[in-house]
Amino acid sequence: MEKCEMFCYQCQETARGTGCTKVGVCGKKPELSGMLDLLVYVTKGLSCVTTKIREEGKEVSKDVNHLVTVNLFTTITNANFDRDAIIARIKETLAVKEELRKQLASTDALPAAALWNGDESEFDAKADSDEVGVLATENEDIRSLREMITYGLKGLAAYSKHANALLYDNEEIDAFLQSALAKLLDDSLTADDLVALTLETGKFGVDGMALLDQANSGTYGNPEITTVDIGVRNNPGILISGHDLKDLEQLLEQTKDAGVDVYTHSEMLAGQYYPAFKKYPHFAGNYGNAWWKQKEEFESFNGAILMTTNCIVPPADSYKDRLWTTGAAGYPGCKHIEGEYGEVKDFSAIIEQAKKCAPPKEIETGSIVGGFAHEQVFALADKVVDAVKSGAIRKFVVMAGCDGRMKSRDYYTKFAQKLPKDVVILTAGCAKYKYNKLDLGDIGGIPRVLDAGQCNDSYSLALIALKLKEVFGLDDINDLPLAFNIAWYEQKAVIVLLALLYLGVKNIHLGPTLPGFLSPNVAKVLVDNFGIAGIGTVEDDLKLFFGEE
Ligand code: SF4
Ligand code: SF3
């Protein structure tokens, strides 16, 4: 293959559906893309060393586990555009790896990535070499499987990182994550081995989401039905986006007497559903929509904005000085707030800036309802089961996942609008913004859009499905009156998908386009074994799912 300036096909918006080769559709430039590839490479190298350390019966510290998860999270689409921050992570990773290598009784059989070391002046050349990056694997099918697993592991790392921030750790998940990264450098593994590793990744995806679910609900209580205001108040505000609830907690605590209101954006909407945050009177509603509307919504918000994770859209100069990052997120020229797990982050500078800002401009009024995570739905189980038994609810459709810029995503709005009135949508993730303001009504008091929360709360949807299976005495989850029409964008959706496949869910429809990283042969494996399919027209799909025109 001809050498391109960069190569990335990890997200749904990849150029031409095949790969960004000159510049990312997301705004990622080649010099950043190469450094992110190198960060993945050295993280795989470190993981070979840690896996060997475990094999020799020695322990790997939590700090090293956290380094791996934060590194992978940093490389997720739209998480971090700051090349200097990536270079710092590569240096730290190499230093930690070199130190750990000394613990090994033998370094025989370690792959090149585990043996390579270099200083910053060598990073660009290394990133540009044939050994680093997606195209380092020549065989198209092996590359496809390796990358699908890598993306799943990035999603798993993101969820683990959020749990870790709440001081929940699971050594088994970290050990798997690192051993899987190491296996991706092992040329002796066949396509069949990698298919098996894909499913194993799905198993740990379930475990990772379970860990985060425990961390979130153990720390902040179980999400509950909540009506969320989508209008504005009169005070200056801080808008918090991304997925990190620990950051939300600290921001709410530090702003309680500051005279500024805190609003959620995009995926942080789910923070509104947790009991622990309801005690803050200055916790205002949700402002705006999904991540890709940032340019207009961050402009009109007027106040300070805190990005705790992806998805960052390269900011306009008009509000760049109001955009702050923390955790794995970063953007060059935007101020970054540091803080290790267990430490209190200092948000005082954001708060001081916010105080001087104008209040947000109203862009919407009214409210939306959410908070239908597993415990809340279980509390309503009798009502739901009665509605299914009486035929008032004919079917559920899982429409979880991500939102994105592509016009073709209008499909999801139209699909939701045209759904038969006796169908209920189960959702999680920012995909919901395509239909959560359509006023789809309720069925005997059960809203027709049941929002469990963030993309990681897709775990709740799986638990709800398993509960329904038990209540209805079914042997197979696929016998439920349940269809899957999932939207995807970045790598957290990949781990959610692999988790669902591991749980035995068949016939998932994935859109708006199938992943560019699936080679024809790997796509065929998914179609033949799991019934994975793309989307068609709204009319055809309604007919397919519900037998209706
Ligand atoms: Fe392209 Fe997506 Fe990669 Fe960005 S993350 S470079 S849009 S494939
Ligand atoms: Fe959304 Fe980025 Fe994936 Fe968390 S915020 S679902 S796209």
Image (tube, rainbow, N blue to C red):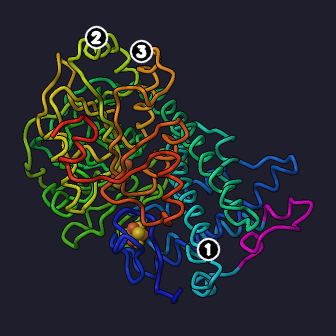
| Rendered-image quadrant of the C terminus | top left
| Residue at (85% x, 64% y) in the render | 102
Locate residue 516, reporting x and y percent.
42, 66
Question: What's the amino acid at mark 1?
Answer: Asn
Residue 138 visible in the snapshot: yes
Q: Dot 3: within a 10 Å radius of its alpha carbon, few (fewer than 14), some, or many (20 or more) residues?
A: some
Distance Cα–Cα, label 3 vs label 2: 11 Å
Distance Cα–Cα, label 3 vs label 1: 46 Å
Which is more toward the observer, 110 or 513?
513
Question: What's the amino acid at mark 2?
Answer: Asp
- Element assignment for label 3: loop
Q: Are marks 3 and 2 in contact (CB under 8 Å)?
A: no
Which numbered tag is attached to residue 458? none
Mark closest to the chain's N terminus, 3 or 2: 2
Locate residue 349, reporting x and y percent.
33, 56
Residue position marked by numbered label 2 in the rendering: 386
Image-quadrant location for residue 357: bottom left
Q: Are marks 3 and 1 in contact (CB under 8 Å)?
A: no
Residue position marked by numbered label 1 in the rendering: 139
- Element assignment for label 2: helix
Locate residue 21, reporting x and y percent.
42, 81
Which is more toward the observer, 75 or 420?
420
| Residue at (34% x, 39% y) in the render | 428
Residue position marked by numbered label 3 in the rendering: 472
Q: Which residues are magenta?
A: 99-117
**Direction from residue 96 to residue 320 in the image, left or right:** left
Mark closest to the chain's N terminus, 2 or 1: 1
Locate residue 449, reporting x and y percent.
23, 32
Q: Dot 1: within a 10 Å radius of its alpha carbon, few (fewer than 14), some, or many (20 or more) residues?
A: few
Depicted 220 relative to depicted 435: above or below: above
